[in-house]
Structures are given as C-alpha cells and as structure tokens.
Image: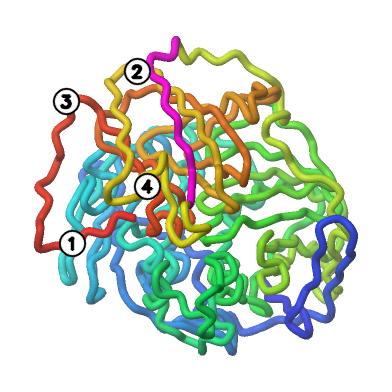
Amino acid sequence: MKKSYGVMGGVLAVFFAIAGCSSDDHSEMDHGNNQQDEQNEGTFEDGKKVFNLEVTETHWMFNDEVMMDAWTYNGTLPGQEIRVQEGDEVVINVKNSLNVPTALHLHGFPVPNEMDGVPGVTQNAIMPGEEFTYEYQANVPGTYWYHSHQDGATQVDRGLYGVFIVEPVDPESYDTDVAIVIDEFASMGMGMGMDHSTMDHGDMEHDGNDDMSHSEMMNEMYDTMVINGKADPQIESINVVEGNRVKLRFVNAGLFTQVVSIPEHSFKITHYDGQPVNEPDVLQDTAFRIAPAERYDLEIIMDNPGAWGIQVFAEENQERLQALIPLVYEEYEDEELQTVDSISSFFDLTTYGIPKELDIGDITKEYDMLLGSDDGGDTFTINGKKFPNHEIYDVEEGDVVKFTIINDTDFDHPMHLHGDFFHVISKGGKAIQGSPVLKDTLNVRPGETYEIVFEAKNPGNWMFHCHEFHHASGGMVAEIHYEGFELPFTPDPNIPNMPE
C-alpha cells in the first residue's frame, strides 16, 4: 500500500553542503484524484499496440489546498504511464478536446520525422475537436516521456506530459520499478487554480516590478514542488522490503534544474536519458542534478531499514521549491522521515563509469552553437539568432556532425536534439574520462563548453532547442535540416502553429 507523507509547516530547509534537515510527523492521506501510478495498458489491434489519449481540461488537486484547472491526457497528471516492449509497433491516437490547438511529441525517442509532433516543423497542430495518429516502432529501449510541443511554455506547464517506457527484450529484474516525475506549480501571490496561459515568457506577472529579471520572476511565481502530480503533504511513498532491488526513473518535466539526494543508501546511475551507462560505479553521499527534460535511472539495493526522505529541490529556487519523496520500509510507516544531513559532493557524468571505445567514424561537419542573451534574459539566441529567424544547420545523411556548444549566459540551458541521440565527447576542452555519454538532452550551465557528436541517420527537419520552454519561446531554437528532405506535410497558414 502507498501512503502520503507531509512535512509540518510546509517548509523543508535544505542547504547544499552545510545544513541538515529532517521531517516531522507524517500520516496517511486521502489520495483524491491521484492516478499517476496507473498505466495506460493500450490494446492490441492488427498486431500493433494502440493507445488512445484525449487532451482535456481537468480540475486537479495537488493536495487539499493547492489546485488548478489542468490540461491533461486522459484526465490524469502526469498522463498515465505508457509501457511497451522493444519491437512493438506502437500507435498513439490523440484527440484534442481543448479549445486551443495542441500536438504530442515523444521526447527522446528517435521517431520518423513526420511523427515528431512539432507544429510547423513536422505537422500542423491538432485543432480543437480533431485527431492525429502517431505511429512508430519501439526499437530503442529506455525511459522517455511525452508532452505537448505546441506553445510548450503554456501547455506543458498546465500538465500535458507523461512517461513513456520501452522495456528491453531481456529486462533486468526489479522488485520495484517506478517513475518519479518532477514538476513545479506557481501559486505564490498568483491565486490558486490560476490560468497558466498568462505565464508565457512575455507576460509573466511580477507585482509591477518592470526591472525584475526573468530568473527573479520565475523564482517569485513558482512555489510548489510537484512529484507525480502531487504536492506535500500528499506525495505518495515508495514502499519497499529489506533486500528489494529498486529501480527509480527520474524525469524532469518542469522548468528548473533540480537537485536529488538519496539518503543513507548506495546506488548506481544506470542510464542517462534512457541510454545505458557502461559499468556504473556505486555512489553514496552524492547528489545529482537533473535539468528540464533529462532522465536519470537509478538502481538501489534496500539494505538500510527505516523511513527515508529522498530530497528534491530546485537549485535556483531552493527556498520555495523543495520536497521529500518517502522511501519507506515495511514496519516503518509511522516513523519520521530521515534525510541527508548535508550534500558533500555532486555527481559528475564526465568521470563516471568505465571508458569504452566509441565507433563514431570521422567527423564530416563541424558547427558552433553559441548560447546567448543580448538583454540579460528577456530574449535568448543561438549564434546571435532567435526564432523564428533562427539558425539552421545543414547536414547530409551519413554525416558525422560535431557541435561545440558554449553557454555565454547566466542561465542553465538544457539543449535537446530531436530525432537522434548524441555522444558527449568533451567538457571544457577535456575528453570524457568515464563511460561514454549518450543523451538527447544536455544541460549546459553558465560558462560551460561541451563538444557533442551525432551521426546523421534519421532524415528530416529536426528541432535543436533549449528545453526551458521560456528560453525557447524567448528565441533559443535552432533546426537541423537534411539535404534533399521534403516536408511530410503542407503548413496551413490558418493554423496557429507554435513549435517553441
């Protein structure tokens, strides 16, 4: 049975390296409309796995006090988890029952271009009352997620996201395998159940302070951490038995880089963005950062009975955005949650795991990607250009393409490549020392420089953009165009496609 735990007073103080924290009493709560742990089982039709998603408005309770009129898939937040097997032919029928256009993007999974769900780039947006069918083969195992790519700063923020998992042919055996989806909600000073469509990059309310920066506005607005659709004190627990082998799939569906710490247990990070780490090391007393759109899979052996609180907090909004995820052994359900006393070190993917030779071929094209902001955070650019007059990188099928990504701003930028994975080969001019790093989203922090390489083997026009949606709507969008590729659709000038 799952239980929900609260932290009395509503505030959990967490400090990077010096402060301890603990939780007070916790008790079982009414879960209300929380259905996040249900799976969308789908149906088999003509040898294909078929899922139906209806996009609707739903009155959603984060807890007994915080609520909003969410936009949801099939009435739940997150949308019901979709799991399929490697090799399945998958069909997702999306019906739009909102009064605005939408679309569905399968984040991280290398679909054919016409199935990528980006309005104005790969399809026209799905108009109110209309349907669109996405079809592809689930041939790459991993942890992915699905979300709207129409006006993402509004629609994902209002709840249009869910988890998509492709199980490998020969899966590892776990006693517990659960996705943990991290998000944020803005209620502070804005009123409960507010219309999040007013929160797009250009319109964010900030108490009349015209000099307030983008970062300050974000920090003022977002004040409630959401875990799997619920906020404290109704975040559901992960219940375990001593000796269990547990897999936790962390997904950041929000806008802030989050810090996660696992209390008093050794663990391994087995996958980045669903892709395996080579011979991962055992970690302890080490926190990891997870930026918007990134995924980290963890493996933990339950060998320290008690009631533990996995800490999650937004690195740049720690005071307001923090939560505990209860990890509770049987017979400890009535105990206080114990937490990490302090954070002494942070995970470094450049040195983690065991090196392995990569066969990526000779580089045939090289590009720079300079992430900038000419006004300190109201607009964001790539190589001095911003959407819709954005940078376009030309490739040919078979090219091995290297990007040098430089962050010349004061903000994190989780850069997401559609259509394929890339290898991270260096950071700050120093080659990766640990396991090969294969990702679809890479967080580039202020002042950082990375080199990434990918093989151009999935023809199409593909977005390459910052996945902090306000940065994308502020201009930080580029595209990769394959030479000779023909658009799979005709853009309709009467449809308000908003791909950013």
Numbered badge on residue 477: 4
Instruction: Decide if residue 13 is in sight here.
Output: yes
Spatial CA span between label 2 and label 3: 14 Å
Q: Quadrant of residue 112?
A: top left
Q: Please state which of the two labelled residues, at mark 4 or mark 2, is closer to the viewer.
A: 4
Q: Amino acid at mark 2?
A: Asp
**Which residue carries the number 3 mark?**
484
**Which residue carries the number 1 mark?**
131
Say what secondary structure mark 2 lies in: loop
Spatial CA span between label 4 and label 2: 22 Å
Q: Which residues are magenta?
A: 362-373
Q: Please state which of the two labelled residues, at mark 2 or mark 1, is closer to the viewer.
A: 2
Spatial CA span between label 3 and label 4: 22 Å
- Whether residue 271 sits left or right of residue 495 in the image: it is right
In the rendered view, tell whether residue 486 sits above or below residue 72: above
Which quarter of the figure is the C terminus placed in?
Answer: bottom left
Residue drawn at x 38%, y 68% as measured from the top left: 154
Instruction: Decide if residue 162 is in sight here.
Output: no
- Whether residue 479 sits left or right of residue 446 in the image: it is left
Among numbered discs 2 and 3, the one appearing first in the sequence: 2
**Which residue carries the number 2 mark?**
399
Question: Which of these two is toward me, 92 or 1?
Answer: 92
Question: Which of these two is toward me, 171 or 496?
Answer: 496
Whole-percent x, y for residue 250 in the image: 60, 52
